[in-house]
Amino acid sequence: MISGPALVVDRTHLGRRASGIERITEELFSAVALAPLPVAGWDAAGSKPSMVLNQRLRIPAAALAHRDKLWLFPGYPPSPWMTWMPERTIFYVHDLFLLTRQDELNRSAKLYMVRPFRAALARLRYFLANSQTTADALRAAVRPEATVLPYRPAIRNVFGLSDQHPVAADDRPLVVGAMGTIEPRKNFVGAARLCESLGRALGRPVELHIIGRRGWGDDASILERQPHVRLKGFLDDGAARAVIDGFDLFLCSSHDEGLGLPLLEMQFAGLLVVAPDKPVFREVLGTSGLLVDMADPESAARTVAGRLAEPGWQARSRAQAAANILRWNRQAAQDRDTVIAFLEARLAALDPSAAQLMQRA
């Protein structure tokens, strides 16, 4: 344990699989990301039993023993024991689906996460959120006096994408890309319906290529039986880049998201991004995306076909994507400054000497 006042970040969920939550933890809550704050990580052995033991018992015990530490939880909800230490507990919230979309949760999430999540929202006082949309929803679910701050991640070109793509030729299938764990909330079955309708609207073959591991539910089995769908599985960054280079546009079909990192990451490829017309996607894409009604695939397909019929649509999408990445990253930088100042104040409130330590740093 680091000596003196410090921020301890729960990293017990890292190392078992790669997902947006794991990436957010490493990119927003490392010692480098939170400099000049004194930061320590709390890790587990990588197994699920070790993660559970650390999250539920060892971290709360350490928090009781080290009262000059702030404890930040950027992955799983904190143990209910931590909610009795609200002045020293900060919860980073990715979405509210544990409350609002329980029919789309797997069994583990229902058993392990829902009750601690409810307790955290009812009792804690300090929250960070991955988007303004999540922050707004969170404010309606927590104590009136709670502090809720957006802490949006800056977007990097993690796949090493180029925005120079050939014109989508009419003599080959149009490739619509998608990314994410194949599970009901992602609505890839709806994406397949849209692509089928788009093929009819364009009078040419349209393929849906999905990068992502199989999750719970029957969606993967349904999709693999459809001749125009290609399931690529989970890919490392290099293999993913090779597949993304073949995309003509990118489709997010999710029923909802807390943020939706892939939408922004695909914009490094200069792709037109199509997404459902929902608040979080308006926040993420600004004016750069094409928003559609996923519940009406025929109407959505006509909207997409109309955009593809416009002269110069690829060049315009490329320019809009680049401008949107700059817009988003400016917001993320402002969020970081606000969060660093907030965390400094919380450390100083626990121990006034912390303020002097950070000033010297």
Image (cartoon, helix red, strand yellow):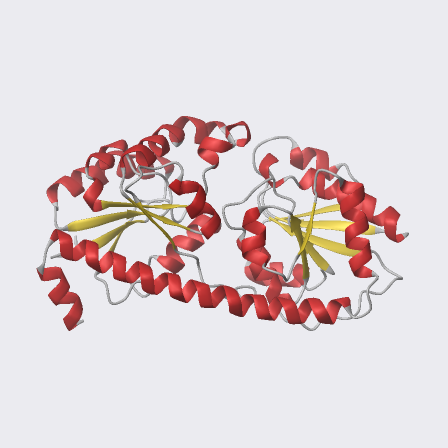
Left or right: where does residue 251 sit relative to residue 64?
Answer: right
Q: Residue at x 20, y 54 (%)?
A: 346
Res 103 → quadrant: top right
Q: Is residue 301 above or below residue 37?
A: above
Where residue 193 sits: x, y (%)? 76, 40
- Figure label count: 0
Query: From the image, which quarter does the C terminus lie in?
Result: bottom left
Q: Is residue 15 above or below residue 31?
A: above
Q: Residue at x 71, y 51 (%)?
A: 209
Where residue 170 sits: x, y (%)? 88, 62
- Name the one closer to the observer, 88 or 248: 88
Q: Residue at x 20, y 45 (%)?
A: 88
Left or right: where does residue 277 sit relative to residue 351?
Answer: right
Where residue 289 sits: x, y (%)? 65, 58
Q: Residue furthest front?
A: 144
Q: Residue at x 23, y 63 (%)?
A: 37
**Residue 18 visible:** no
- Name the one closer to the observer, 190 or 336: 336
Q: Is residue 98 above or below residue 28?
A: above
**Residue 116 visible:** yes
Where residue 31 sits: x, y (%)? 29, 62
- Name the one closer to the observer, 74 or 288: 288
- Name the one closer to the observer, 314 or 146: 146
Left or right: where does residue 89 sit relative to residue 276?
Answer: left
Left or right: where does residue 321 sit relative to residue 36?
Answer: right
